[in-house]
Image (tube, grey):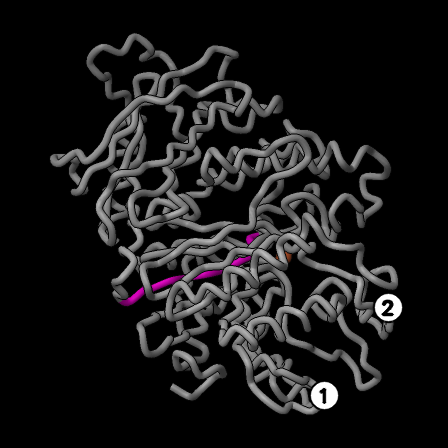
Amino acid sequence: MTLHRRTFLIGGLASAGVVLAGSAATAVAYPFTLGVASGEPAADGFVIWTRLAPNPLNADGLGGMTSANAAVEWQVATDATFTQIAASGTVTATQAWAHSVHVTLTGLQPGREYWYRFRALGHISQVGRARTAPAVGSSPALTMLFTSCSHYEAGYFTAYRRMAEENPDLILHLGDYIYEGGAGSGVRTHQPSGEITSLANYRVRHALYKRDVDLQAAHAAAPWVVVWDDHEVENNYANLVRADNSPAGGDFAARRTAAYKAYYEHMPLRSAQAPSGANLQLYRRLRWGSLATLHMLDTRQYRDDQACGDGTKLCPAADDPGRTLTGAAQESWLLDGLGQRLGTWDLIGQQVFFAQKLAAADGSKSMDSWDGYTANRGRLQAGWQSRGNTPVVLTGDVHRHWASNIMDNYATQNKVIGTELVTTSVTSSGDGNAADTGTSSLNPHVKFYKNQRGYVRTVTTPTQMNVDFRVLDKVTVRDYPIKTAQSYVIQAGSPGLLAP
Ligand SMILES: [Fe+2]
């Protein structure tokens, strides 16, 4: 892919020691080892991100930087060779934020491509491609990819490479961008070697992932919109309730604070989203012209503890009307946003399986998913029906592709009121098995299952969404090709999966 080749050439040139006029810091090693990223596209701009880390895996988490501030120059151009500069400036990187920078650009033109790069410590970064959202009132076709669950040890990040090659307008990551566990078995090994709990260790783990060239290619190819799930902190945590006993003890609030801070430092989020104490406001809305509205949820930070001790089981307490997955504030924020009908399509990007999925005839269900918070789901479903919405819910978490019709009543299967597309993982669960079956007569509204790794591609227009479930035959061997396992069409205003 030409974009990536250019990225490599510029990165290679800089790391070979290009000396910039006026720079005295030429002895410092190449600081852009974690690549560049853009995110949060709006009609007038986006965020550009990088982090200075000449020695990214240093155990102190400081990336080989000293306590000194560093000036980071940035440029945004309308062409890939930077002959037409649209905006430029300088921002200060500080050790307090691990020398990460988050520049929120405004004043750009809607609905077009831009290219960006940074310069610091005598070096020039790789080039990234970004895109502004279209203006309200216009609805050009949107090519969007979404994925989740990228465990470093479980496989190579080939899916990220293939995503970059698709030249999408937008990429969503729906959570489990890193995993918190210590070194295990797999095609490569986690650093630090133990389960991460401190700020230094979360920073090193993020740096380990961000050093991956396939991941860097995907970030450089398009703006990302990210939300976390559990493993950015700890498996199946709920708000400030820890779920694991490994490592035993510790102050979980302090651990979550460290994890949220490191997440912010490594993601192309707006500086306004920087964490404050133990909290980080992650749920938010993005508009893609008049075509689509992205309602991005956070189903970890505000949830009640999993009912009946978590797991997959029969648990009447899961149906308690007082239970919440979103928290009351996020629930009303979502319903309010759906009610505004800002675009043709309402896309709800979130973490855990939304539609009912019975695991056994006795009614056993997963307590970590929306099945463990059925009153919250019921209020949302009733709320969007009364507002005239037919949303598409985009989900990660379960390391499998799934596609479902969302039903008004799952017991009677009376009426399709929305559509759920669940992406498989980048690597988590390894190569998988294309022959596995997962659909069941217990869940007639669940139409598709595939146990392979990859991502989902959607091409959305004012009249329909074309959906392709993309898969790789192996992730434990590098460089497999991507292919489509299944396709569907969803008609605007008419919920449910149709044959293409
Ligand atoms: Fe996961």
Amino acid carrying label 1: it is Ala
At horizontal 30% and vertical 33% (from top left) the residue drawn is 11
Tell me where the magenta segment starts and ends, as one range.
141-150
Q: Element type at marker 1? A: loop
Q: SS class of the residue under badge 2?
A: helix
Question: What residue is pinned by disc 1?
Answer: 411
Residue 191: x %, y % from top left? 62, 36
- 351 shown above or below 484: above
Looking at the figure, which quarter contains the C terminus?
A: bottom left
Earlier along the polypeptide chain: callout 1 or callout 2?
2
Point out residue 186 in the picture as x, y percentages from the top left corner.
Answer: 62, 52
Q: Quadrant of residue 79?
A: top left
Q: Amino acid at mark 2?
A: Ala
Q: Characterize the magenta stretch by its predominant secondary structure.
A: strand
Left or right of residue 478: residue 82: left
Mark 1 surroundings within 10 Å by alpha-carbon count, few (fewer than 14), some (14 through 19), many (20 or more): few
- Most extreme residue toward the left, as rendered? 83
Residue at position x 79%, y 67% from top?
Answer: 321
Residue positioned 60% across, 52% down in the render: 176
Looking at the rendering, the quadrant in which ligand 1 lies is bottom right
Q: Is residue 147 magenta?
A: yes
The disc at residue 317 is 2
